[in-house]
Amino acid sequence: MPPLVSQHIHPAGTWRGDHDSVSLSYDARFLRRRMLTTTKGTRFLADLAQTTSLDHGDAFELQGGTLVEVVAAREDLIEITGPDLMRIAWHIGNRHTPCQIEPGRLLIQRDHVMQDMLGRLGTITRHVSEPFAPEGGAYGHGRTHGHDHTASHGHSHTHEHEHEHEHEH
């Protein structure tokens, strides 16, 4: 029997009714095509038209109309508190690190390089395990992509080039 397939997402707040759920980490909520298993054990293929950033509360619609709610999974995070969180948020953003911004605290994915930097900036950090729902990207893509501090693979990702733009005024 072929697996169930979902090719449609209902945004959070636009659907209601009986549903199953699937718990996904922040990274796993960025997908186009992937086999998933719900909390009730149903396997289905998410086969979306394009790579999509899913939010907590969105729902996959399976063929036949069954809904599967996306639940943000608990993740290992760093909670950041202390004075001048606005300045700290700037440093985190300057490194293109996904950050959940809340009153009185910031949350980022665990990263020893970031934790060391934050300590040198005078913050208070502690490890927590919570769902992670960082701010979306500034250009409407719904996602930022952090810098990887773990490995180099021998080539540059810069795309610099010179060109001119002509403008009529």
Image: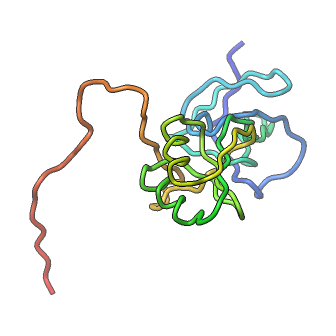
On screen, 104 above or below 95? below
Query: What residue is shown at x 53% (from left), y 34% (from top)?
Result: 112
Residue 121 in percent (x, y) is at 51, 54
Query: What residue is shown at x 58% (from left), y 32% (from top)?
Result: 47
Residue extending furthest toward the right: 18
Residue 92 in percent (x, y) is at 50, 53
Q: Is residue 169 left or right of residue 132?
A: left
Q: Is residue 169 left or right of residue 156?
A: left
Q: Is residue 157 left or right of residue 32?
A: left
Observer-nearest of 167 and 4: 167
Residue extending furthest toward the top: 1
Q: Quadrant of residue 131?
A: top right
Query: What residue is shown at x 55% (from left), y 41% (from top)?
Result: 115
Residue extending furthest toward the bottom: 169
Tell me the quadrant of the picture where the N terminus can be found: top right
Tell me the quadrant of the picture where the C terminus can be found: bottom left
